Image: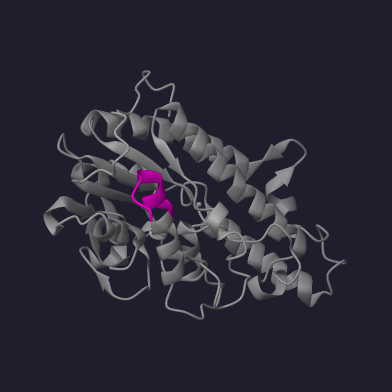
Amino acid sequence: MKTSVRAGLAGVLAFGTLAAVVGLAHRDDGDPSPPKGPYVALGDSYTAGPKIPDQHGAPAGCDRSDRNYPTLVARRLGLPTAQFKDVSCTGATLSDLTAAQTTDDGTNRAQLSALSARTRLVTLGIGGNDIGFASTIEQCVTRGVLYFAMGGGEFAGGDAPCRSRYASGDTDKVRKKIDAAGRQLSRTLGEIERRAPKARVYVVGYPAILPAKTAGCGREMGLAPGDVTYLHEKEQQLNTMLRERAEATGAHYVDTYTPSVGRDACSARDARWIEPLVPQSSAAPVHPNERGERGMADAVLKAVGASG
């Protein structure tokens, strides 16, 4: 995702990741010990860590931090530099895993090109950009500002003016995009299996971006109360899709949502994992800060059997 409010939000709600694909299942040899590498990290801005110092790697437009969760995982596993490749990139979609991605500062090669038969560990965190969360949040904030300016109840759409734009009756445009991303993710996981048949694959879900309850959140994020609930529901649906698609192919799912409850963008500054629209720590808007990346790393390490 981009690091502007629109792009930053792209990774975000920086929110991707089966199965009916040729019946492929990712290999799991039953060994409970954590993989020793080589490790390849794939993903979007929630993986890359835009605006978190220090930014490094090429191309510069991918906005990777040397404190993002893949780097922390690699360090904890004791992997040497040659055994770790972080090819995540801000703004990435599922299509950017198999094709080059153009950024504001350089081109990132197709992320799956980093895989090989030697790869033993893969993490994949993607999907938010595929469902258009950047533009969705932008639209919701625009309507939220008008909602508060007009005193709330008189604004078209009631307390959820953004939801009324995207959902009507049994039709929900965001839900349709989640379903489409799921089908594409299935194909992607099959391709990962083909390129790295001996790797353990972990699909990393998204941490809590907004709270389940709207009290004390809407104004800070510029969102009408009902739209806080709506966007929270969409993230839950995205994570559910990621889990189901991962498990259907024999990949593992990493739950970063549960440990982040109460640490969303509307929580206290010294507790939050996700920064609000106006960041108060070094991070892109509505993206993980350094604390959030550490929390996500802990969740991955627990999943691979390296916690404690």
- In the image, taking residue 277 as reference, residue 1 lies left or right, namely left
The residue located at (42%, 78%) in the rendering is: 282
- In the image, taking residue 84 as reference, residue 156 lies left or right, namely right
* Tally of numbered discs: 0
The residue located at (54%, 53%) in the rendering is: 257
Residue 91 drawn above or below residue 55 = above
The residue located at (37%, 68%) in the rendering is: 50
What x and y, as percent, mark residue 160? 77, 58
- In the image, taking residue 144 as reference, residue 182 lies left or right, namely left
The residue located at (37%, 52%) in the rendering is: 301
What x and y, as percent, mark residue 56? 23, 69
Q: Quadrant of the C terminus?
A: bottom left
Residue 102, magenta (yes or no)? no
**Residue 51 or residue 305, whichever sits in front:** 305
> Furthest residue to the right?
154
In terms of secondary structure, what is the magenta stretch mainly?
A: helix
Q: Quadrant of the N terminus?
A: bottom left
Residue 187 visible within the image: yes
Q: Which span is picked out in magenta?
A: 299-308
Residue 162 visible within the image: no
What x and y, as percent, mark residue 106? 23, 63
